Amino acid sequence: MNEISVPRPNNLDAFWMPYTDNKSFKDKPRMLARAEGMSYFTPEGREILDGTAGLWCCNAGHGRREIVEAIQKQAAIMDFAPTFQMGHPIAFEAAARVAEMTPEGMDRVFFVNSGSEAADTALKIALAWHKARGDSQRVRLVGRERGYHGVGFGGMSVGGIGGNRKQFGAQLPYVDHLPHTHGVPGNLFAKGQPENGANLAEVLENLVALHGDTIAAVMVEPLAGSTGVLVPPKGYLQKLREICTKHGILLIFDEVITGFGRIGANFGAERLGVTPDIMTMAKGLTNAAVPMGAVATSNQVYDTIVNGVPAGIELFHGYTYSGHPLAAAAAIATLELHRAEDLPGRARAMEPYFEDAAHSMRDVPGVIDVRNMGLVAGIELAPRAGKPTARAMDVFKTCFDKGVLTRVTGDIVALSPPLIVEKPHIDRLFGTLADAIRAVPA
Ligand SMILES: Cc1ncc(COP(=O)(O)O)c(C=O)c1O
């Protein structure tokens, strides 16, 4: 393919890149300049097969004409309008479309701009709900080790990834964590939900025994993505739901990755058969074409907070860009594509082939576990002696050089392609990954 006409930076210094080893990147940059369907293209025109839907977000594939046109059209009609004490029709339309997809009775939607903002918003709504009911002593938030809920102070504190916290000292007070569900004996190379570990949810009873009626909410990812694809053990989320209900604790699902078809249903809640009180979403909501996140709540959570105030603002929270017109237009077009092309159904139909391909990695030397559900797989490598994470990073770089985009976290390689993926793409993704694992030093 010909070179693509894109701006050529002659200096990479100014952009302080997020979650990046800036020095090594700027030494040997990996640039993407264009995207279409299942692929990215480098500025030189080299094709890179997208094994990660960008960052778990371009579920409908890249450059979808319907989404592009909706954004273009909206930009010309109205670039921006506030949603504080004002409204514009497509923000309401977008919320109604989201509510059509959420579990029954979770029909109220608060718009934000990212997964991090969704996490912090969900936590604040939970606290406000208890306060509205006169349960002001419920201020404690419970997350889970290895959980990822973005980078705001709420999400970081309730999240359970040490590396994301250690530079910043202060965390929210009154936060506790459940144990993660990784490494339970008998669960290695499980296909879909592992058999063992539901009892880990019972640790919540210990926290209740310790803290009494001061716990406001428990927030977990139904399937933990960023920490390396941890699929919930069978019965685990059901148990968590039971204990939350029993003790008047709100259950929040962070569906930023699991939403919009990723695990073969509209949301993880649907696929895994457990309905939370509050759920967060972002990424796939607009196919990532314009940043947008959302928090869906049960009608009862909304009614309690909104009707609990006789007049005036009911929730002192919101963002300048909540319900931004371009994002709302992108969301409506994206959700229309989801419906018209049944992307969740597509993911479910492709799951067995993807699962077999993922588990074929078991035979590659150095692979110590494979986990999967829907169109997500985590392939865990034995770490290089004395250098944790180095082996997977080398695999990532080798895959990129060989034309496949993967994602690594620790010593785990995660694959989560757009839901329009076809069998030959899956063969190429796992074939390249296997070659790369074999090629890099153990
Ligand atoms: C479960 C979960 N929550 C929150 C976030 C944060 O989203 P963002 O990067 O849009 O702030 C992510 C991002 O990967 C995520 O996976």
Image: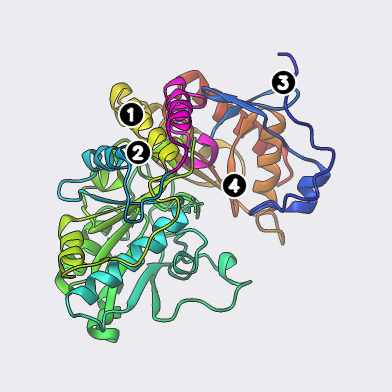
Q: Which of marks 4 and 3 is nearer the N terminus?
A: 3
Earlier in the chain: of badge 4 and badge 2, it is: 2
Q: Is 28 situated above or below 44?
A: below
The answer to whether residue 45 is magenta is no
Circle 1: residue type: His
Asked whether the beta carbons under mark 4 and mark 2 sit within 8 Å of each other, the answer is: no
- Tell me the kind of residue under disc 3: Ile
Which tag is nearer the camera, tag 4 or tag 2?
2
| Label 3 sits on residue | 4
C-alpha separation, residue under disc 2 versus residue under disc 1:
8 Å
Does the residue tagged 2 have its C-beta within 8 Å of any atom of ligand 1?
Answer: no
Q: Residues within 10 Å of mark 2 (few under 14, many from 20)?
A: many
Report the side of 428 relative to 391 (left or right): left
Magenta span includes 65: yes
Mark 3 vs 2, N-terminal side = 3
Q: Distance between the residues labelled 4 and 1?
A: 27 Å
* 352 horizontally vs 106: left or right: right
Q: Name the residue under label 4.
A: 408
Q: Do the residues labelled 4 and 3 touch (CB within 8 Å)?
A: no
The residue that label 2 is drawn on is 260
Q: Which residue does the numbered mark 1 point to in the structure image?
A: 338
**Point 71% across, 36% down: residue:** 398
Question: Which secondary structure, mark 3?
Answer: loop
- Closer to the camera, 143 or 42? 42
Between 96 and 189, the residue placed more toward the observer is 96
Q: Which residue is nearer to you in this view: 413 or 15?
A: 15
**Residue type (three-letter) at the residue carrying disc 4:** Val
Figure check: 119 above or below 48: below
**In whole angstroms, how far apart are the C-alphas of marks 4 and 2?**
22 Å
Of tags 4 and 3, the one toward the viewer is: 3
